[in-house]
Amino acid sequence: MIIRRQFIAGLAVATGTLAACQPSSTAQSSEKKTSRTTSRSAGTRLTQEMLEDALTGSSYLGCGGGGGLQEARDLIAGDLASGHIFKSITVDELSDTDRVACPYGLGSIAPGTEMSKTLDALDDRIDEPVQAAFELLERHLETKFSGVILGEIGPLSLAEGLSIAARLGVPALDADTVGRATPEINQHSVRVAGYPLTPAAGATQFGDEVIVGKLGQPSRGEDIFRALSVASGIIGVVDAPITGDIAKRKGTLVTGSLTLAMDIGRAVREAKAAGIDPIEAARVAGDGYKLFEGRVGRSNWADGDGFLEGDVIVAGTGPYAGQSLHLDYKNEHLVAKRNGKTIATCPDLITMIDKATADGINNPDFIEGQEVAILGFRCDPLWRTEAGLEVFSPSYFGYDEDYVPIETRLGI
C-alpha cells in the first residue's frame, strides 16, 4: 500500500461519465466503452534496470514525500517476481477516445499516531485499496481504462501507478499530474487545466467504497477525502478519468516525467559505476541546483490533520561550513532558508539526499548527524502560471512569502 499525495478528488453520489472529460463549464456526450482500446502490446517495455532508475530518480523529485523508496523497490520487485510486465506510452500514443485515469493513495505519512494505533486493531479486507478504487471506478463508468496516469513523481507513488498498470495489463503514461510529489489534491494539473477530477472512486483497506460524482467547489475534494483518509489511515483513490484527446492537450498533464525520473536514476547509477559524484550527476541530469550540504541537526514533526508537518535544520560542512539551512515541510519540503534567507520555495522542488547512498530521503526518515546534500529543481511551467500559483505557492500554505523562481532567488 502507498502512503502518498496527499491529495485527491471529489465526493458526491455518482453522476455520468461525461463531465469528467470536459472543461468545468461544458459537457458533451460520448459512448461508454466496455473494453480497453489500447493494445496490451502497445508501449515501451520497462526493464528491471529502467524501473530501478525510475525509482531512484523519483526519490530526487519526491521532495521528501511520495512514500518510501525501499517500499517502492519491494513493490516493484514483487511484481517482477510474479511475472508482471511493465510498459509505458507517451500521451501522443493515446487515441482521442481512449480513457485513462489517475490512481493513488491518500494518507498521512506521520508514523505512530493514536489514530494509527486504533486502526491497527481492525481487520484489513482489501490488500490493495488503490487497485480496488481503480476497478470500482471502471465498474461505475462501465468502461475499461486504456492506461494509467501517474499521480505524482515520488517513490511509492510512482511504484503504485506502475504496479497497477502492470497488474491490469495496460501501460502507464509517461506523464503525471504534478512533476513532483505534493501535499494536497489541489495541486493537480488536470484541475488547474480546468477539467473536473470527478467522477472519482475511493476504497479503504477495510472494504469501504465511495463513488464521488460532483463537487460544489473543486477544493472540497481535498477536504472530503482527507477526512476519509484520517478515519482510515489511508484511502485508495482514482480520479481524473479523462479522454486521450484531453490528456494530449498542452497543460493537462506534466509530460515526460517518468523519462526524467529514469534519466536522473540512470545518471546516479552510471556515476557510481564510474566512481564519480552521483549526486552531482543527478543534479546535472535534472538541470538542478545545489543548495547546501551538511549534517542533519534538530528536527521536529507532528501529525496535523492527516499531514506530516515539520522542519529540520542542517549544519553546513565543506564549502557551507559555519552556515545553516532550515527546511519546512508539509509532507513535502516547501521552503528552504539558508542563513535565514529564503533560497527556494514551492512549487519549485527542494529535496534532501543521503550522501552515503545517493538516494533521496523521505520525511521524516533523516537522522541526526546524517550527511546530506540539498538540491533544488525548477517546477513544471504550469505551476508558474496564475492558475498554478493559486493552489501551489508559499502563501497558499500560509507562508508570508511570494513565489520567486528558484533560478531568480539564486541569481542564476
Image (cartoon, helix red, strand yellow):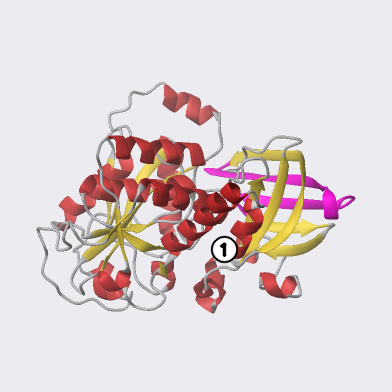
318, 105: nearer the viewer: 318
As drawn, the residue found furthest toward the top would be 121
Q: Amino acid at mark 1?
A: Ala
Residue 316: say if magenta.
Answer: yes
Residue plotted at (38% across, 49% down): 104
Residue wearing tag 1: 285
Q: Does residue 287 sit above or below 265 in this rendering? A: below
Quarter where residue 339 is shown: bottom right
Question: How would you rate the neighbour count of disc 1 (Cα within 10 Å): few for under 14, some for 14-19, many for 20 or more?
Answer: some
238, 306: nearer the viewer: 238
The quarter of the rendered structure image containing the N terminus is top left
In terms of secondary structure, what is the magenta stretch mainly?
Answer: strand
Left or right? Give the position of 207 relative to 104. left
- Residue 331 in view (yes/no): no
| Image location of residue 201, percent across then percent down | 28, 51
| Image location of residue 284, percent across then percent down | 61, 64
Magenta region: 304-333
Residue plotted at (42% across, 58% down): 220
Residue 97: say if magenta.
Answer: no
| Image location of residue 136, percent across then percent down | 22, 47
| Image location of residue 307, percent across then percent down | 55, 45
Quarter where residue 24 is shown: bottom left
* Element assignment for label 1: helix
Left or right? Give the position of 290 relative to 283. right
